[in-house]
Every structure is written in structure tokens, then in C-alpha cells.
Image (cartoon, rainbow, N blue to C red):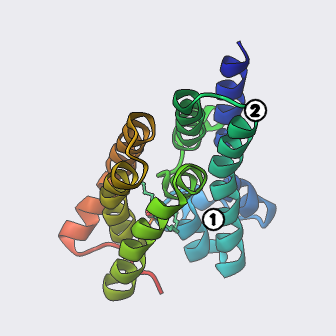
Amino acid sequence: MKEILFVLCAYLLGSIPTGLLLGKAFGIDIRKQGSGNIGATNVYRTAGKKLGILTLLGDCLKGLLPVLIARAAGLSEAMIAGVALAAFLGHVYTVFLGFKGGKGVATALGVFLGISPLAILLALAVFVPVLYKWRYVSLASITAAGVAPLAVAVIEQRVEPTAMALVISFIVVWRHRENIARLRAGTENAFR
Ligand code: NKO
């Protein structure tokens, strides 16, 4: 019973659209600007560095906090993975925006920070150089999503977090399909 409540709360917390709310507070609807995404990159692009970083922090905490709380409450490995997935799905398919949401990168970062911080180090070891060399956050996100489940599998050597990482990474890449089309067409927004 307790578990259902945790999953529901994680989903609702994940559903809070940090970037959209921060943008609105400053009179900007980020869904109508730049890539139209509600994530940190688009907030950074359209509303400035400070709000972008705040969005990254907020979206990351939405993933991290539920995992930490579920662990402190003594939930099983499988349930912790379930709570993590619920927070992530909240961000990507938020109930507050008609089930349209973000691309899940920052919330996945938070979730994995709670579940396998070492795997995040490996994902960052890919994300940062890719971003530095090619200047596309989307490309760096997609590459990191490719590495994350492998890193979780190798480091944690357990089925639950690995399965959760696979599902999350698949959705992250799926949510970047417009970015992939732009990357192929050479029209993706560069990060600067
Ligand atoms: O507006 O479509 P856009 O160009 O904004 O945005 C594309 C972008 C969307 O994602 C975001 C969140 C940005 C977070 C950047 C810091 C991430 C550090 C990532 C470390 C590795 C995370 C691994 C999880 C992968 C599943 O992509």
C-alpha cells in the first residue's frame, strides 16, 4: 500500500514543469520559443543562463528526491526503481500539461544520481566531451542515454536498476526524435 503512495507522489512531483513555471514567472512561455521544449536547455536558450541552471537543478531534484526518500523508507530495490521511473515519467508525460512534457534528461540525471552515482560519472564522461566537441546538448544527451544503461549494468550488476535504466534511456532517445531529424538535416540549434 505504502508503495502505491510513493509511486503516485513521485509521479506528481516529477510532473511539476519547473522550466515552464520559471519561464512564466518571468513572462516567457518557453513552449513557444526555441525548440519549444520545457527542459533546461531551452530555458537557458530562451530565458537566460540563471533560469536554465535553476531548471536543471529543479528537474534533477524531482528525480533524486523520490529515490532518496524511497530508500530511507526502506522500499525494496524493485520498488525504488519503480519510484524512480514514476518520477521520470511524470516529467516526460506530465498530467499538468495534457501528458506532454520534457525530454527527461535532467530528471534521469537526478534518478541515476540516487541509484548509481558512479554510472552518472561514466555518462558525464561521455556527455561533456560530446557537448564540447559538437556543441549540441541533444547529441550529448542521446549519447549519454546510450551509455547510461550499460554503465548501470556493469556497476550495479542487478536487474532492477538496469531494467529501469534501459526503459528510461529508450524514452529519452525517443523524446529526442525531432532533435535527431534536425541533427541529420544539419539544422539543430548549437549550444553556446
Ligand atoms: O531544447 O531540444 P532542446 O535542444 O534540456 O533540448 C535538448 C536537451 C533536452 O534536455 C535538457 C536537459 C539538459 C540537461 C543537461 C545536463 C545533463 C548532464 C547529463 C549527464 C548524463 C545523464 C544521463 C541520463 C541519460 C538517460 O537534450
Look at label 1 and name its amino acid. Answer: Leu
Nearer-the-camera pick, 157 or 84 = 157
Can residue 16 be seen here? The reply is: no
Q: Secondary structure at mark 1?
A: helix
Q: Residue 139 at x, y = what percent?
A: 33, 69
Q: Secondary structure at mark 2?
A: loop
- Label 2, residues with CA under 10 Å away: few <14, some 14-19, many ≥20: few
- Furthest toward the right, the residue is 25
Image disc number at residue 73: 2
Quadrant in the rendering for residue 53: bottom right
Nearer-the-camera pick, 2 or 174 = 2
| Location of residue 92 with respect to 8 vertically, above or below | below
Q: Residue 45 at x, y = what percent?
A: 55, 75
Image disc number at residue 56: 1
Q: Residue at x 71, y 78 (%)?
A: 50
Quadrant in the rendering for residue 171: top left
- Furthest toward the top, the residue is 1
| Location of residue 113 with respect to 175 vertically, above or below | below
Of discs 1 and 2, which sits in the foreground? 2
Q: Residue 48 at x, y = what percent?
A: 66, 78
Quadrant location of the N terminus in the rendered image: top right
Judge from the rendering whether residue 2 lies leftward or rightward of residue 97; answer left or right: right
In contact (CB < 8 Å): disc 1 and disc 2 = no
Q: Residue at x 35, y 48 (%)?
A: 153
Q: CA distance from mark 1 to mark 2?
A: 26 Å
- N-term-proximal mark, 1 vs 2: 1
Whether ligand 1 has any atom under 8 Å from the Cβ at mark 2 is answered as no
- Furthest toward the left, the residue is 184
